[in-house]
Image (cartoon, grey):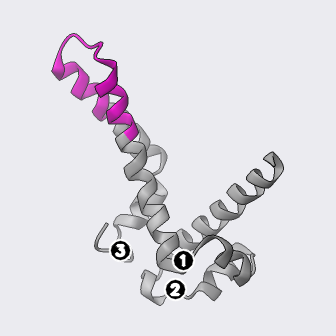
């Protein structure tokens, strides 16, 4: 079971990276699934095991930073150990910015003119 999970995560990451690489030069509406699969080195049938279309893959990519940032904020909200609200806000901001810096490649693509304007 664990080996299968590793393969699934690897395949999804490969598809994600492929789409992000393609979005550096083209908007999502100009990227066919065939191009994503070619860039990722996976078959179309493998793509469809995990995603309905390229927009479904993009939604998953867009959701990740939002979920991670929400986790960071929730962690501090649940802790209630800081002596002042100002210190807590600074610490939250520092952690959010660290996350953004660590994921700058994907976030930069998502916020670019080739990304989804709804993001």
Callout 2–callout 1 Cβ contact below 8 Å: yes
Where does the image place residue 104, in percent across and percent down from the top left? Answer: 44, 53
Residue lying at 47% horizontally and 59% vertically, measured from the top left: 106
Quadrant (top left/top right/bottom left/bottom right) for the C terminus: bottom left
What is the chief secondary structure element of the magenta stretch? helix
Q: Which residue is mark 3?
A: 116
Q: Earlier in the sequence, mark 3 or mark 1?
A: 1
**Label located before the other in sequence (2 or 1):** 1
Closer to the eye: label 2 or 1: 2
Q: Residue furthest top?
A: 83
Dot 2 crowding, Cα within 10 Å, few <14, some 14–19, many 20+: some
Q: State which region is magenta.
A: 71-93
* Residue 24 appears anywhere in the view: no
77 on left or right of 22: left
Vertical order, 73 against 66 (above or below): above
The image shows residue 72, relative to residue 43, as above or below, that is above
Q: CA distance from mark 3 to mark 1?
A: 14 Å
Identified at 38% across, 77% down, the residue is 114
Residue 53 spot, x, y in % from top left: 54, 81
Residue 17 visible? The answer is yes
> Mark 2: which secondary structure?
loop
């Amino acid at each position: 079971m664990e080996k299968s999970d590793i393969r699934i995560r690897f395949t999804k990451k490969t598809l994600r990276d492929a789409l992000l690489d393609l979005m550096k030069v083209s908007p999502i509406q100009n990227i066919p699934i065939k191009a994503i699969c070619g860039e990722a080195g996976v078959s179309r049938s493998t793509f469809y095991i995990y995603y309905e279309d390229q927009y479904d893959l993009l939604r998953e990519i867009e959701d990740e930073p939002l979920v991670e940032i929400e986790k960071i904020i929730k962690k501090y909200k649940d802790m209630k150990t800081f002596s002042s609200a100002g210190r807590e806000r600074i610490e939250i901001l520092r952690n959010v910015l660290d996350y953004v810096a660590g994921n700058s490649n994907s976030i930069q693509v998502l916020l670019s003119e080739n990304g989804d304007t709804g993001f």
